[in-house]
Amino acid sequence: MVEVNVDWALESSDRLVDARQVEILLGNALERERMTGSWLFAIRFVDDREMAQLHETWLGDPSPTDIMTFAYEPDDDAHGGDIVISVETAGRNAVYAGWRLPDELDFLMLHGLLHVLGWDDRSVTGRSAMLERQYELLASSDVRDGNE
């Protein structure tokens, strides 16, 4: 079971993903990662200013980044975490990657999920493996089916 709270902390009224889509995306990924049990996620979409503040507070770097993940301490009832994504940085990433912003947001949410599951991208090898898995999980998801 996956429960998701989506928070758009932006002035824009555009909502590029909704909680149900995120539940499907993350639920599929958890199934493919052979994870069971209850999972809770809070996804917060922010601007670069808020992300830069969080990045400085938690990692001592005042620049914005695309995503930050805060895994919950596992307990007997549920696992999960908070995932914060800068929509502005994600937009730049999407242009660079040559795909739509909603696809980049999905890609980043999968990145956050993998961090919650213990994946580590601090080494070149770890980052390469993690990105490869993100692409595989995104390709296996039918949340959008290219229809938007």
Image: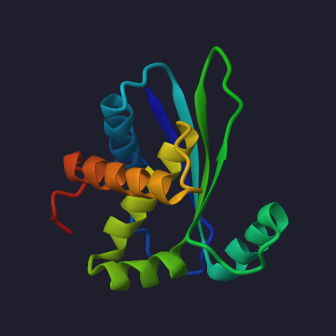
Q: Position of residue 49 (x, y in %)?
A: 70, 81
Residue 18 at least partly seen: no
Residue 95, horizontal then vertical, whole percent: 35, 85
Q: Residue furthest top?
A: 76
In the rendered image, residue 115, in percent from the top left (x then y), is placed at 55, 46
17 vs 62, left or right, is: left
Instruction: Say whether residue 92 is left or right of residue 11.
Output: left
Image quadrant where residue 41 sits: top right
Q: Is residue 86 above or below residue 142?
A: below
Res. 132 visible in picture: yes
Q: Nearer the viewer, residue 58 or 100?
A: 58
Residue 77: which quarter of the image? top right
Number of numbered discs overlaid on the protein picture? 0
Q: Residue at x 33, y 54 (%)?
A: 132
Q: What residue do we see at 29% from left, 76% from top?
A: 100
Which of 74 and 3 lies nearest the eye of the viewer? 74
What residue do we see at 80% from left, 61% from top? Answer: 58
Q: Image check: 72 left or right of 142?
A: right
Q: Quadrant of the C terminus?
A: bottom left
Quadrant where the N terminus is found in the figure:
top left
Camera-side residue of 18 and 79: 79
Point out residue 94 in the picture as x, y percentages from the top left corner: 36, 78
Instruction: Tell me if residue 124 comes above or below residue 104 in the rendering.
Output: above
Residue under the image location 16 percent in, 64 percent down: 146
Q: What is the image's colouring?
A: rainbow
